[in-house]
Image (cartoon, rainbow, N blue to C red):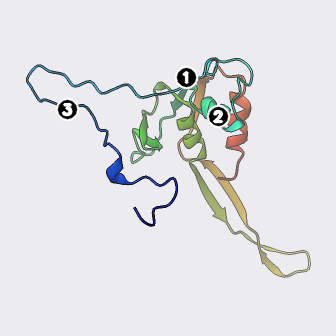
Amino acid sequence: MAGKKKGAVDAFETEAKGPADISGEKGVIYTPEAAEIEIIPGISASSKGDAGLSDHARELLFNEDFVEVMVHESTDENAENPVFTSCNGVPQYFLRGEVQTVRRKYLAILACCKEHNMKTPQYTAPDGSRAVGISRTSSLKYPFSVISDPNPRGAAWLKALLHSPT
C-alpha cells in the first residue's frame, strides 16, 4: 500500500474479536469470559500502615467506613422525613429518630447541610453616627448524633467538618 505509515495497522488486516456466539437456546446460559484483572496482594481496606496507598486512596477508604448515626426528630411538621442524601448517584435515606448504620461519606453530606441566618442590627457608634452591624449564625439543617464510630480519626474528622464554613 502506497503512503502507509510505518507501524500503522489497517483495519482489514486485523481479525475482529467479539463475544462468543450466543445461541439463545432455551436452558443455555451465556457466561462471558473472565476479565483480566491484576490483583495486587496485601492492599485492602484492612491493611495495616500505608500499604502502598496514596493519601487520596486512604481518604476514600476512610469515607467507606461504617458509622452509627441518628438524625434527630423535628418539631416542624413540614420537615423532611426521611432525609435524602446521595453520593455519586447512590441514595441514602435517614429516618428521623432511628439509629442507622451508614457509610461515613453520607455523614459528611449531613454535616455539610447547614442553614445560615444574617441579622443586621442598627446601633449608634461611639462617634455618634448610626451604624449597622452584621451577625451571622449557622446551624445544622438536619441535626444528628453519632452513636458509634470505630475509627480513631472519626471524632477529629467530624469536628473539623462541623467547624468548616460550608
Measure how far apart labels 3 and 1 are at the Cα level: 29 Å
Q: Residues within 10 Å of mark 1 (few under 14, many from 20)?
A: few
Residue 10: x, y in percent?
38, 54
**Residue at image mark 1:** 39
**Label 3 or label 2, whichever comes before in sequence order:** 3
Measure how far apart labels 1 and 2 are at the Cα level: 16 Å
**Label 1 or label 2, whichever comes before in sequence order:** 1
Residue nearest the viewer, comparing 7 with 61: 7
**Label 3 or label 1, whichever comes before in sequence order:** 3
User: What's the amino acid at mark 3?
Assistant: Asp
Measure how far apart labels 3 and 2 are at the Cα level: 40 Å
Q: Is residue 163 left or right of residue 18?
A: right
Vertical placement of residue 77 versus 117, above or below: above
**Residue at image mark 2:** 57
**Residue 21's disc number:** 3
Quick one: SS at disc 1?
loop
Tell me if label 3 and label 1 are in contact, CB under 8 Å. Answer: no
User: What's the amino acid at mark 1?
Assistant: Ile
